[in-house]
Amino acid sequence: MIQTFKPSKFSLRLHHISRKQGFLTSVQLQRRLKNVINLDCKENKNCGFSCNKITASIESFSSSCNKSTRDKSQLAQNLGATILEHELTLQPKDGEEATPQSDLWRKWDAFYRFCRLYSVIGTIIGVTSVSLLPLTSVADLSPAFFVGSLKAVIPLAFVNIYVAGINQLVDVDIDKINKPYLPLASGEYSMGQATAIVSAFGFMCLALGIMFQSPPLFIGILVYFFLGTAYSIDLPLFRWKTNPYLAALCMVGASGFTIQLSVFYHIQKYVLGRPIVFTKSLGFSVIFFSLFAAVLAMFKDIPDVDGDQEFGNQTFSVRFGKEKVFTLCITLLMIAYGSAAVIGASSSIRLNKLVSVIGHCTLASFLWLRANSVNLDDNASVQSCYMFLWKLFNAEYLLIHFMH
């Protein structure tokens, strides 16, 4: 929760003085400010603010006019601080006072925004869903399976947080334009705090990958880690986000191939102890989510055109325009849903056929309706649609179990 303050009548009167009167002598300034303070205190009898405090600061400021410039500057800062204190006292949000609970909520909210937890939730849902694909019967749902699934969920969620964090560390100046609400861009986190969080999660994901002794899982974590680092870090041969094709490759490699293949073979070989087999549902999952990830990679840059142009990031939206990229993204997803419905209709199991066809047609209808309501000139509208795409992305993890 971010505390906000609105200008009081006091500050508006000060603004009126500065706009209307121009430069004033110290005596004139003192007289006019005292009049403003007296009037303001009459209107705000219960504000809890001491008018004498500001008056004393004004008199001190006025009497210092014959001192050095440095002294006058310091006293002006004291006066400004006193006025600011008055502003904050007059305008608490909804009469609430700071509490340990509200402070804890603000910290959680900042961490939520820093880690981009909607992406982390998508990873957790994806890993959990793909873990179920190798199962052939209810008897496979053993304690060993759940432990093996957790071994995949935890480090891949950690590497996701690392990737989101390192991107913000490198792009803090761009985010001040495109995403000023992020903790680093807004100043809620210092560079030291953000670096500590990124380093901790980066170390933990690699350490857990080694500890769990599953080669497919460790390779998946390593590939995800590398792609996320190459996407963001500003070193020779890296900073792949500046190339739209390499940027899309990073997203496809992480969400399309890495999670699907590494988790599936981790469960099949090192948890269930079965020979490695490439199934129809796994093949569909790799192709569908790779295409969807490519769309997300292009779509996420649509509202960031201003910042990307200023810093020379040649995204698809910068090169070809918002309208063309938006149309391409929606078209690709509609093709993906249509293909999924056709593949589902070819299933020999009636339940799978009904669920896959009806499910994909329903999601395609939701997408079409939402796309028609998007205003590309409103970044909030585009960002809202982007978050809706993530919901569709996560919903597909349910339907892949009917693609047999």
Image (cartoon, rainbow, N blue to C red):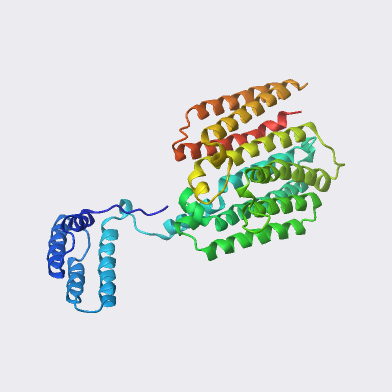
Residue found at the very far bottom of the displayed protein: 67
Q: Position of residue 116 (x, y in %)?
A: 55, 49
Which residue: 56% across, 30% down?
Answer: 327
Number of labelled discs? 0
Is 368 on the left-hand or right-hand side of 100? right
Q: Is residue 108 visible?
A: no
Residue 66 versus residue 342 in the image, above or below: below
Which residue: 37% across, 59% down?
Answer: 98
Q: Position of residue 18 (x, y in %)?
A: 20, 58
Residue found at the very far right of the displayed protein: 275
Which residue: 43% across, 60% down?
Answer: 100
In the foreground, 275 or 144: 275
Which residue: 64% across, 38% down?
Answer: 294
Quadrant placement of the C terminus: top right
Residue 228 versus residue 358 in the image, above or below: below
Q: In the picture, residue 102 is in which quadrant?
A: bottom left
In the foreground, 389 or 92: 389
In the foreground, 152 or 72: 72
Residue 86 versus residue 244 in the image, above or below: below
Is 84 on the left-hand or right-hand side of 145? left
Q: Position of residue 219 (x, y in %)?
A: 77, 52
Q: In the picture, residue 334 is in which quadrant?
A: top right
